[in-house]
Amino acid sequence: MPPTLILVRHAQALHNETHDYSIHDPDLTKVGRDQCKTLRQALMEDPTAQIAELVITSPMRRTIQTALSSVDWLLEKGIPIQADAGWQENSNKPCDTGSPIDKVAAEFPTVDFSSVDPVWPDKTSPNASHYHYTKTALLLRGQAALKKLYERPEKVIIVVSHSGFLRLAVSANRYFNADYRIFDFAEMTGPGDTYRLEQHALTEAKGGGLGLSSKDTVVLGMDMPDYVPEEVPEVEA
């Protein structure tokens, strides 16, 4: 049986606060660190989160910081935390482009970076086509990220990622900073079927586990460019 997924958006980061998208791989703000405390408490009290067996994080600083501040209680029990480039944010602006792995690995030694795609943090070269900011690449990346988790043996997996990617390439839901939603995989109807998620009734009805997120849904891939634009709009990253 495929795992249940708890999808978490990172807490507020500097670019969210300042709307300065030229900040490279920004850190969490004080507000963001406080949001992590609220998220941590909610996850500790959530029956599904309590039995999580794996934590996946985008290799970006704000997602790593959110994960380490909100699920430390799981990590202390020996639950592994792994970085995966497939869950990074959409655009190639500085705020959505990661730092070299040797740098973040030295700063966050408890995170396993060993399986991060060697092309990281490249998002623009031909070799990094999987991470290009195009509708085709992003939808394919969403499917690839879900496929990897669908095939894992754990019963519950927590993923800390980004609003744009979660909304437009994975679940079609909106996520406020440091809020989360819980999903099961929809039943596969055939070998060519796409990976789809079905949200748990509680987080759907509340607008996220903390009740902070809009209940509106979107169409996967909407408003994403069909080619790499010279200027990439920033949307709730």
Image: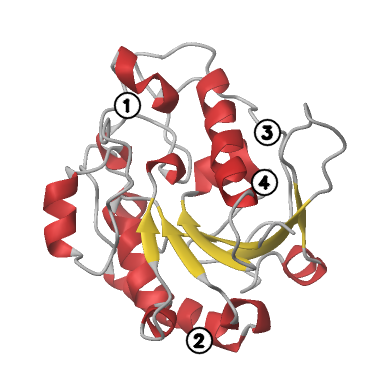
Q: Gap between marks 4 and 2, in whole Å? A: 24 Å
Q: Nearer the viewer, residue 225 or 146?
A: 146
Which residue matches tag 1? 123
Q: How far from the left and from the top, in percent, is residue 95?
A: 28, 41
Query: Mark 4 and mark 1: span between their CA atoms?
Result: 22 Å
Q: CA distance from mark 3 to mark 4?
A: 8 Å
Q: Quadrant of residue 61?
A: bottom left
Q: Look at discs 1 and 2 and give the one toward the viewer.
A: 1
Q: Quadrant of residue 212?
A: bottom right
In this figure, which residue is indicated by the disc labeled 2? 41
Q: Is residue 179 above or below residue 86?
A: below
Instruction: Name the side, left or right, on which 16 lies relative to 22.
Output: right
Look at label 3 and name its amino acid. Leu
Identify the residue at image location x=44%, y=40%.
86
Circle 3/circle 4 CB separation < 8 Å: no
Dot placed on the residue nearer the N-terminal end, 4 or 1: 1
Q: Earlier in the sequence, mark 4 or mark 2?
A: 2
Image location (x, y in percent) of residue 146: 60, 44
Answer with mark 1 or mark 2, whichever residue precedes in sequence: 2
Drawn side of residue 231 relative to residue 182, left or right: left
| Quadrant of the image containing the N terminus | bottom right
Going by the picture, which residue comes out furthest to the front?
153
Does residue 87 appear to the left or right of 76 in the view shown?
right
Q: Which mark, by number, is residue 150?
A: none
Residue under pointer 4:
171
Q: Is label 1 in a helix, a strand or a loop? A: loop
Please report the residue visible at 33 percent of the width from the left and 74 percent of the height from the top.
33
What element does badge 3 sit on? loop
**CB atoms of marks 4 and 2 within 8 Å:** no
Could you tell me which quadrant the C terminus lies in?
top left
Counting residues from the start of the chain, the first of labels 3 and 4 encountered is 4
